[in-house]
Image (tube, helix red, strand yellow):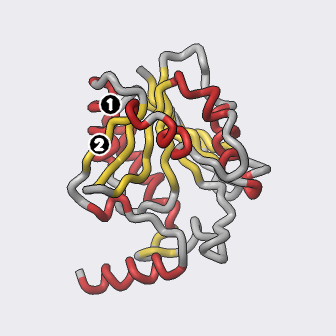
Amino acid sequence: MKTYIIYLAAGNSRRFKEDKLHALFKGKELYLYGIDTLKQLLKYRNDIEIIIVSNTIDIQEECIYSYKSPLSERGISYSIKAALNHINQKDDYQMMFMVADQPYLSYQTLNKMIDIFNQSSYSICSLMFKDRVGNPVIFSKDYFNELYSLKEDQGGRTIVNKYPQECFYFIIENEKELYDIDYQSDLQKLIKEEEYD
């Protein structure tokens, strides 16, 4: 089973008020945390292909391909469509959607999440800490058309909420892995936490 990991990095950072992905966190651009995590994962798996959707990042390496999303400012659904256009539907595959603003997400978590989902009978899988759900989310290929039909700012969570009985929640022990950075204040909070750790 092939897992297409779709790395969503084409948002226009409306809430952050500036280009979030290239903002510095611990001396490294934010988007690079996820890329480095995926490169680590590639050392352990030969059943994944990474599709980066971004208008500012261009990486073309073995199993990692960047594509532009010219309509991304109209909403996340356009970035999702841009990624889905590059999936080979003849493959036996599933799709993992990952966002580019979760600096603490580990390759070990992604690795286990894919394995456990592959062994389950569920068709959706979402990361979870206690009662808080978040990204990444995996969808079986059965949801390709519904994902493609999302409108404007509808994301994959719309589909998760529609089929709660189909979703397996992969529980993590480190809440930080779910941290995402939407606002400048989120980034400043993480920087402060790092100073105290």
Q: Residue at 52% x, 24% y: name it.
A: 141
| Vertical comparison of 6 with 191: above or below | above
| Vertical comparison of 130 with 91: above or below | below
Q: Residue at 29% x, 46% y: name it.
A: 109
Q: Are marks 2 and 1 in contact (CB under 8 Å)?
A: yes
Q: In the displayed structure, does residue 180 sit left or right of residue 11?
A: left
Q: Which mark is residue 117?
A: 1
Q: Amino acid at mark 2?
A: Phe
Q: Quadrant of the N terminus?
A: top left
Q: In the displayed structure, does residue 163 sit left or right of residue 172?
A: right
* Residue annotated with mark 2: 170
Q: Position of residue 101 (x, y in %)?
A: 49, 62
Residue at the top extreme? 90
| Vertical comparison of 140 with 44: above or below | above
Label 2: element kind: strand
Occupied quadrant, residue 74: bottom right
* 126 vs 192, nearest the viewer: 126
Label 1: element kind: helix
Cα separation between marks 2 and 1: 8 Å
Q: Residue at 49% x, 82% y: name it.
A: 185
Nearer-N-terminus badge (2/1): 1
| Vertical comparison of 197 with 158: above or below | below
Q: Amino acid at mark 1?
A: Phe
Q: In the displayed structure, does residue 180 sit left or right of residue 153?
A: left
Q: Characterize the local packing of mark 1: few (<14), some (14-19) or many (20 or more) Cα atoms within 10 angstroms.
A: many
* 39 vs 109, nearest the viewer: 109
Q: Position of residue 162 (x, y in %)?
A: 51, 37
Q: In the displayed structure, does residue 92 sit left or right of residue 150?
A: left
Q: Quadrant of the C terminus?
A: bottom left
